Each structure stands twice: as structure tokens, then as C-alpha cells.
Image (tube, rainbow, N blue to C red):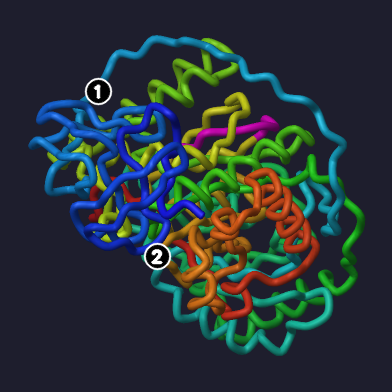
């Protein structure tokens, strides 16, 4: 078995598949190299001498520039490599129009809804419109646990600090997020809980909800009633009674929308977990389903790969704006655009933003880009969509749910326990993590390194998704973890 992997024939580095020692002669498929330094799992070594100032190639693309001469066998990381990225760019479209063979949709069992796609959960949600009523929402959720059971698959409150003292886009984003969650197919019943004097109260949010099933939503303004706990419980009991009539029915996978996200990545994420998600995305979109890729700052350095897969010129222009607008957002706060890999990413072997982005975008597979979404916009076009949201795990995962994802696939090389408003499937990039954190991890993509093919791994991931869509709980759900994070960009009054 190879101790290292060279991802493409152009690459000047290979990645360690396990911890390696200085002086070892190791194989990387096409040859061997003697290491000059210890190499942690997921980290890179030079396959030939690299000159100072020379671009270093990984994934077939530059991931930065050598800051010193690097001899063959040496560790390539933050001490001798830096980014080549700079500010906003002019882009040219070089369309490749990848061919996609249609597949017969697979089947799962979900909950039919009056409007929109089916739910893969039938949960009772309590959504505070403003942070001032967070504790009321949490108290209601505690008392309403007695309503859970049967078709009522869970009762959850989603506290957040917003809904008042916000201006412009921030206020609009809060309204869009709450309206989208109030009409999300995974919610069989929703109590929208307001205070009564906030900027983004119930009357401001309702117009954003558009078409919704009135039998599944209730509204309560706490300042308008004597005992909000008693009034809230009465409404929750009405919703639960309605939900108990619901049953899972056969649904086809073209009715699925799945969000694609990674976090706590390591040097193996772009080799195992993210490519497996890419195979899954290709399979689902070939069936007429929808996937959504986000984390715009983690596209920097790999954005042209996505741009060239845009289905037409308008989508290309939207993708250019998606990228450059996010760079301008960073620059407007005088923040560095390219200081992105986190300490955990770097410890796991990721060196530059290009390195991270080229691994991150493996989740998109090879399908054409069919849609580009603003933050808070729902995905309406089947196929691969790109969504404007930051890389932050909680914010980006919430954004995917808001855009209609019934489930989020979340790859990780370091591990994380959180869950967003929808089932959050944790996919480990390496088997040691999957074995160590069995209470966090749902799927082991490290099996790719033990002889499983990428196609087999992607197909197994599809089967896992269908089981979860049919009711199997993720680890984060079993742990009771459901979090909400709204993107805040501007001033708080």
C-alpha cells in the first residue's frame, strides 16, 4: 500500500496517508521519495526540488509560491509556502459544458407538503423573532417535549440574538431566514414567537413567507397576552395534533435538496470525503435532484473551475459577482481576504487558501452549475447551485437550510459535534477520526484509502442519504443538537 498519494500527475507534492518519519523511503504510486523530515498525516512533501518563487502544484493547480528553496523529500507547509492570491480579478469564461447522463431517481420515504418539496423530518419548531424572547422559546420547548412521539419527531427552539436594532441587509437577512425556516418542509408545525416591539416582528416577517400551509403555522406576540407560556403551549398542542395525522410516503430523489459543506478540514478532506460528496452530488443531480455548494471564501483560488462549468454566460457573470462581492466585503472592513485556513486546518496539513479551496470544491463533483443564489434565496433550479454565504460552519450550514436544503452533508478531518436546523451528516476524511468520534461521525470516507473505489464510496453515501431522508437519525440528531446562526454583516444599534 502507498504511504503517500499524489493527486494528479502534475503535482509537485504528495500527501501523507499516515504519520511518516524522516529517513523513510515511501511510495506515492508512480515512484518513491526519501523523506527529509517527519511528516504528520495529511501533510505534504516535495516530490522534487522546488526553487524559491516557483508555484507549487497540488490538485493539478498552484496552491501558492515557495518562499525558499525546498529540496525533494522536505515538508511543504506554512514555513516555506505562501498564497499567490490577491484582490478582485477580471475573469474570462472558458465553458466546458460537462455532459451528464440522466439516471432514474432513487426513492426515499418523506412527508408530503401542501407547497414545495417533501419534508424528511416532521418536527415542531419554535422560532423567536427577536432575542428578547429566546428564553420563552426555550421554556416552551422544554414543556412541549411531552408532545413529541409518533409523527411528531421532535420539538426544538431556535434562539438567536437578532430581530431588533438591525439596519439594512442585516435586518432583511433576519426576516428572510426566519420566514424560510417557518416554511421549511422539515417543520411539520411552526410557532413564530414575537415580542411585539421589535423591528422584525411577526407582521414584518409574514410578507416574506409567501405561500405556506396555514394549518402548520401559528403566531404569538408575547406582549399581547397575559401568560405567554400558557398561550404558547395551547398553540403547540394544536400544531402537534395536526402533525399526528402525517405519515411518511414514497418520494423520488428528484425532490431532494442537499447542502454541501466542510469544516475542520485536514489534508485528506480533498482526497477522500470531499470527492465522495462530489460523486454523490453528480448522482443526485443526474436524478433531477438539487445540491447547493456554499462557503464562498473557500472557493477563492478554485473559482475558475466552477466558473467554467456554468451553464451559460449569465450564470458565469453571477458567479464572478459572487466571488468579487465577497472579496469586496472583506476589504470594506480592512480585513485580509486570503488569511483563511484555521489553526485546525493548518495542523491537519492545509497550507494556503488555494490548498483549502481546491479541496473544498471537490464537493461539487463534475456537474454543470445551474444556479447562483444570494444569501437567503431558495434554490428553485435542479442541479448544482452556488450559494453566497461565509465559511463559518454554523452560519453556512444554516444558510443551506434556509435555501431549502432538507439535509446538509458536512465533511470534516478534525471532527465537530454541531447540528444545524436540518439533519447534518458528518463525513470523516479519515478512519481514525471515524473510530475515535463515533458519537459525532455518520460516515467514514477514509475507507477510500483501504481499497474502496471513489465510485463505490459515493454510491454508499447516496444510500446513507436516502436512509437518513427516510428517518434514520444522524449522530447530531441523536445527541439533540440543533443550532441556528444568522449571517450578520453590519451595524447593531
Which mark is on residue 414?
2
Q: For mark 2, does the 10 Å Cα neighbourhood hold few (<14), some (14 to 19), or many (20 or more) residues?
A: many
x, y percent for residue 137: 52, 77
Q: In the rendering, at what x and y percent does residue 357 appear?
A: 37, 39
Mark 2: which secondary structure?
loop
**Closer to the camera, 369 or 165?**
369
Answer with the quarter of the image where residue 446 lies.
Answer: bottom right
Real-space Cα distance between discs 1 and 2?
Answer: 31 Å
Which callout, 1 or 2, points at the residue further toward the start of the chain?
A: 1
Q: Where does the magenta region start and end?
A: 380-388
Q: Which residue is mark 1?
A: 88
Do labels 1 and 2 touch, CB within 8 Å?
A: no
Residue sitting at x 20%, y 47%: 74
Q: Give how far across and how far down residue 333 sits, in percent.
A: 17, 41
Q: In front: 243, or 380?
A: 380
Query: How many numbered discs, if any?
Result: 2
- Whether residue 415 appears in this view of the structure is yes
Tell me if residue 135 comes above or below residue 295 in the rendering: below
- Can residue 194 be seen by looking at this rendering? no
Q: Does the stretch in magenta take in 381?
A: yes
Q: Residues within 10 Å of mark 1 (few under 14, many from 20)?
A: some
Q: Which residue occupies 31% across, 33% down?
A: 12
Q: Which mark is residue 8?
A: none
Q: Residue at x 58, y 59 (%)?
A: 450
Q: Nearer the viewer, mark 1 or mark 2?
A: 2
Left or right of residue 246, residue 440 in this image: left
Q: Give 139 or 337, whichever is nearer the viewer.
A: 337
Question: Would residue 292 be counted in the magenta stretch?
Answer: no
Q: Secondary structure at mark 1?
A: loop
Amino acid at each position: 500500500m502507498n504511504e503517500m498519494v499524489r493527486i494528479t500527475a502534475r503535482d509537485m507534492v504528495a500527501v501523507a496517508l499516515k504519520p511518516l518519519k524522516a529517513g523513510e523511503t515511501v511510495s506515492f504510486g508512480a515512484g518513491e521519495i526519501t523523506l527529509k523530515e517527519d511528516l504528520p498525516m495529511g501533510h505534504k512533501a516535495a516530490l522534487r526540488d522546488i526553487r524559491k518563487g516557483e508555484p507549487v502544484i497540488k490538485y493539478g493547480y498552484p496552491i501558492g509560491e515557495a518562499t525558499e528553496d525546498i529540496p525533494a523529500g522536505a515538508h511543504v507547509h506554512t514555513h516555506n509556502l505562501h498564497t499567490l492570491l490577491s484582490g478582485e480579478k477580471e475573469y474570462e469564461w472558458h465553458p466546458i459544458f460537462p455532459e451528464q447522463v440522466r439516471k432514474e431517481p432513487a426513492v426515499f420515504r418523506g412527508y408530503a407538503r401542501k407547497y414545495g418539496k417533501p419534508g424528511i423530518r416532521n418536527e415542531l419548531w419554535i422560532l423567536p423573532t427577536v432575542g428578547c424572547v429566546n428564553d420563552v422559546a426555550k421554556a416552551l420547548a422544554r414543556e412541549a417535549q411531552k408532545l413529541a412521539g409518533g409523527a411528531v419527531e421532535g420539538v426544538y427552539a431556535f434562539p438567536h440574538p437578532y430581530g431588533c436594532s438591525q439596519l439594512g441587509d442585516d435586518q432583511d437577512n433576519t426576516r428572510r431566514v426566519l420566514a424560510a425556516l417557518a416554511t421549511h418542509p422539515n417543520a411539520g408545525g411552526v410557532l413564530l414567537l414575537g415580542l411585539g416591539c421589535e423591528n422584525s416582528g411577526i407582521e414584518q416577517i409574514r410578507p416574506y413567507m409567501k405561500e405556506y400551509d396555514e394549518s402548520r403555522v401559528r403566531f404569538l406576540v408575547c406582549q399581547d397576552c397575559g401568560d405567554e407560556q400558557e398561550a404558547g403551549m395551547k398553540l403547540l398542542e394544536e400544531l402537534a395534533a395536526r402533525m399526528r395525522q402525517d405519515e411518511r410516503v414514497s418520494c423520488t430523489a428528484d425532490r431532494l435538496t442537499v447542502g454541501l459543506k466542510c469544516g475542520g478540514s485536514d489534508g485528506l478532506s480533498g482526497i477522500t470525503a470531499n470527492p465522495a460528496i462530489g460523486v454523490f452530488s453528480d448522482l443526485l443531480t443526474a436524478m433531477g435532484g438539487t445540491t447547493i455548494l456554499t462557503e464562498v471564501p473557500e472557493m477563492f483560488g478554485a473559482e475558475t473551475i466552477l466558473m467554467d462549468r456554468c451553464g451559460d454566460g449569465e450564470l458565469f457573470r453571477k458567479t464572478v459577482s459572487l466571488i468579487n462581492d465577497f472579496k469586496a466585503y472583506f476589504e470594506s472592513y480592512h480585513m485580509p481576504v486570503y488569511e483563511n485556513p484555521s489553526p485546525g486546518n493548518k495542523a491537519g496539513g492545509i497550507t494556503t487558501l488555494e490548498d483549502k479551496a481546491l479541496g473544498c470544491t471537490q464537493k461539487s463533483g463534475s456537474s454543470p452549475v445551474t444556479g447562483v443564489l444570494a444569501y437567503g434565496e431558495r434554490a428553485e433550479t435542479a442541479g448544482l447551485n452556488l450559494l453566497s454565504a461565509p465559511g463559518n460552519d454554523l452560519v453556512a450550514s444554516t444558510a443551506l437550510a434556509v435555501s431549502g436544503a432538507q439535509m446538509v452533508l458536512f465533511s470534516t478531518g478534525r471532527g465537530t459535534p454541531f447540528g444545524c436546523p436540518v439533519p447534518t451528516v458528518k463525513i470523516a476524511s479519515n478512519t481514525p477520526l471515524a473510530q475515535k468520534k463515533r458519537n459525532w461521525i455518520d460516515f467514514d470516507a477514509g475507507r477510500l484509502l483501504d481499497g474502496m473505489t471513489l465510485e463505490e464510496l459515493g454510491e454508499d453515501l447516496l444510500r446513507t442519504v436516502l436512509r437518513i431522508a427516510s428517518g434514520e437519525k444522524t449522530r447530531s440528531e441523536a445527541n439533540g443538537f440543533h443550532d441556528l446562526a444568522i449571517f450578520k454583516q453590519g451595524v447593531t444599534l
